[in-house]
Amino acid sequence: MLEFRFMPHSTPLRDRVPAAQSPALYNAPVPGPSRLETLLVLLAGAFALWILVTTINIARAGWVTIPTADDWDRWVTYVTDHYRVSWFFRQHVDHRLVVPKMLFAIDHLVFDARGWFLMVCAFCFQALTGIMLWQLAGRAYRQGSTERLMQAAAIAACIFSGQQWVNFVWPFQVQFPMVYCFAAAALFALWQSAERNWTPSWLAASILLAALSTYSMANGVLVWPVLILAAFWLGVPRRWIGAIAAGAILLGATYFYHWHKASVAIQPPASERLPRVVIFGLAHLGSPLAPLALLSDNDDVRLAVAAIPGLLLAIALLAGFVMLWKRREHFTNARAILVFYCIYLCGTSATMAYGRSDGSLIDAFSPRYLTPSYLLWASLLLAAWPLFLYRIRRPAFYGALCAAIFIGIVVHQREVLDHVQEWVEVVRLGETAVIDNVTDPDPWRILFHTPRMTLDAIDYLKSNNLAIFTEEWTHWPGMPLSRRFSIDPSADACQGHFEPATAIPSPLKPGWRVTGWAWDNKGKRAPDYVVLADDSGMVAGVALADFPLPTSLSALSPRYTASTWNGYVSGQARAVTAYVLEADDRSLCAIGKQTLHRSGTEVAFSDLGSRLPDPAPEIAGAWTPNGYYKGQGGPGASPVDGPAFGSYPDPLTGTLRLGPFHLDGHTEIAIPLVTGPDSHNLSVVVRDADSKEIYAQLDPPPIRVVWWAWRPELPLDRELNIEIVAEDKGSGWGQWLALGSPHILRPH
C-alpha cells in the first residue's frame, strides 16, 4: 500500500524525505543562535511591530466615510442596476469584481457603507497571505527558531508596509490584497493536498480558491496556468490536472465573455509600446525601492533605480524556475510552491505593465500597485533563504535584513502618514462640498473625475442614510436653525473670524467656499462644526474644523492650530452668519457675518464665440502682457485669441482695467482666468462703467492654476456699459492673477 502511493501519478512527499537523501545545503544541522543573532531578530521583530502599528494608524488617519475615486463607480452602477447578477459580473476597467462586490454588499447592507469593514478585510487578507507564506517556508527547509522569527518579521514588514497605503485606506481597494491572498491560498491548498496524498477536499479547495482569485481582479486569471504547472511538478493525478484545466477553461471563458480592454485617452506610438511595457514591468518588480527612487527629481533616474534591481530579480527568478525542473532534488514541495507563487506575482507585474504603461511610467510606483511587489520580494526571500545562509554568515545576513527593513520601510512610515493626512484634508473639504451642495473642482479632483456622474448616487446615499450621510450634521443644511440649535447670548462664549467668501463658479452646482478660524471658549477647544445661517433663519451650510492654519492666519497663537474651518454655501447671493457649535452640541455662538456677492459660473472654452473689442487697458502697477508663470507646470498661453495680461511674478501688485464694453442686454460674456497657488488679496470685478455698480465679482477668485472661462452673472434686461477690473494686492508666494481677452458666449 505504501509503495502504491508513490507510483507515477503520486510524487514522493519530498517534505518527508530523510535528511540523508536530500542536499546537505537544505538539511544541514541548524546551529544555535548567537547573542548577536538573537538581538538582531528582536530588532527585526520590533521593526515589524512598528510597521504594523504605524500602518494601522495610517489607515485610521485616512479613513473617510465618503466614497472616493473608483468607489463612486460602485455606487453609480448600483443605483441603476442594484444587486442584479449582471451588476456583480459587470466589467470595471479591465476587471470583473464579483467577489469584492460581495464584500461591498455586506459593507452596504450590514455596516451602512461606512467603509471600515472593507479596510479590516484588507488587513486580514494581507495577514492570511503572510501566514501562508510563513508556513510554506517552515516546511521548505530546516530552520531554527530564530530563523522562523526573522522570516515572520521580514514577511510582516513587507505585507504591511505603509507604501501601499491606498490598499489599506481606500475601501474599494480590498480587491488588491484579496486577489493575491486567494492565489496564494489556491497554491497552498494544492500543496496541502500533496502532503495528504491528494486529498480530494484540498484539491477541490484549490480549484475553488483559484476561481475566487479570478473573480477578484483580472490578475487572478493568471493563477490557472501557474496552478497547472505546479500540479505537473507535484505529480498531481491526471484526473485532477484535468479538473484544474477544465476549471481554467470554464472560468476563463466566462471571464472573457464580452470582455474588452479599457481604452486610454492617449496612446504612445507603436514603436514605443514594447520598450514602455518592459521598463514599466521591471520598475514595478523593483518598486519596493520607490521611496529611494523618488528621492531623485529625474524620472529616468527614478526608473533606473527600480528597474535595474527589477531586472536582477527577474533573472534570478528565471534561473530558479529552470532549476526547479532541472534539479528537482533541491526543492521540497513547499519550496517549489513558493517559487510558483513568485512566478505568478511576476506574471501579474507583466500584465500590469501591459495594461498601464500607456500612461506615465512613474505609475509603476503607484501605492495601489505595490502590494504584489512586496509579496514578490517576501516570497523570493523565503525561497532563496538557504542560498543566502550558505553564502553569507548568519549575523551578517540578519543585519542586512534589519538594515533593509529600516531603510526601505521604517523610516518612510512618517512620510506616508503625512501624505495621507494631506489627502484627507482635501477629501474632508470635498465632504463639506457634497453636503453643502456645491461642486468645487479643487476637492473633486480627488473624489472623482466626473462629478456630474455621481449626482444620483449622492441622492441615494443621502436618502438611505449611508456612508457619510449616517452622520447627523450632513442633514443640517436646509433646516430651520431653531429646530436643532439655540443662540448662546454670552458675549465671550467663543472667538474667531469669518474671512471673505470665495466664489465657486461651477457649471454644475455653483456656490461659495467659506473659511475662517474659531475657538470655543467654554469648551476650551476648537469646535467640530461651524454652522452657517442666513437672515431667514435657515441653515445655509455646515463647515468642518480641524484644518491646518493657512498662511493668512499664521499670526495666530499655536493654541489655535486646529481651529481653521472650511465649508460651503449654495443658493442665491445673500448675507450669511457663521456660528460656532459649542461643546454642548446645541448652543451656537456667532463669530462673524459676510455678504455673498453674485459671481456667475464656469463655461467651456468651446462655448466662447467672437472676441470683444480690444480697447487699450488701463494699468496701475506691475501688470504686464502675458504676465503669468511660464515654467514647468505653468498654465501656458490663453486657449483663446486676443491679448492676455497678468501680475506675475508673485511680489508684483497693481490694478488692470479692461473696457468699457457695450452689451445689448441679450449678450453674455466669458473671461479667461488663471491664478497662482494662492488667491488671497486677488479680485476680479465686473461693474457698470459709469455708476461703478458691481454686477459680479470674484473676491478672491477660486484657485485655478490652469485657464478656465468665467461667465459673470450680468443683468439681461437692459443695455450695459461694463468694465472689468482685476486687482492684485498680494505680494506673497503664488499670489498672481492673469486675464485673457473677454469673449461673447455663443447662444444656446
Image (spheres, grey):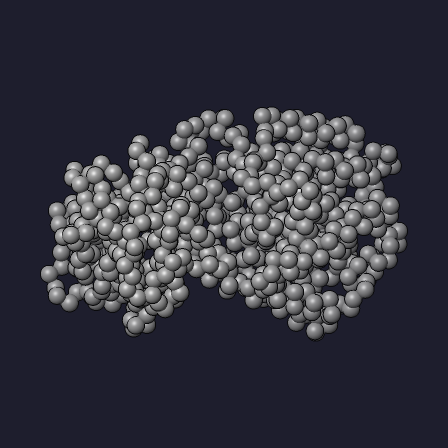
**Image side of residue 626 versus residue 130, left or right:** left
688, 219: nearer the viewer:
688
Q: Residue 293: in sight, yes or no?
A: yes
Q: Decide: is 200 above or below 727.
A: above
173, 48: nearer the viewer:
173
Quadrant of the frame with the N terminus:
top right
At which x and y percent is residue 353? 64, 45
Quadrant of the frame with the C terminus:
top left
**Image side of residue 223 versus residue 552, left or right:** right
38, 94: nearer the viewer:
94
Q: Decide: is 244 above or below 544.
A: above
707, 235: nearer the viewer:
707
Q: Decide: is 698 above or below 183.
A: below
- Tell me which residue sits at (73%, 53%) in the image: 311
**Image side of residue 260 versus residue 485, left or right:** right
**Image side of residue 280 versus residue 582, left or right:** right
- Tell me which residue sits at (78%, 68%) in the image: 393
- Tell me which residue sits at (73%, 62%) in the image: 144
Q: Residue furthest right?
A: 21
Q: Residue 464: in sight, yes or no?
A: no
At which x and y percent is residue 493? 17, 65
Q: Decide: is 279 above or below 96.
A: below
> What is the tally of numbered marks visible in this picture?
0
At which x and y percent is residue 570? 25, 45
- Tell me which residue sits at (23%, 50%) in the image: 660
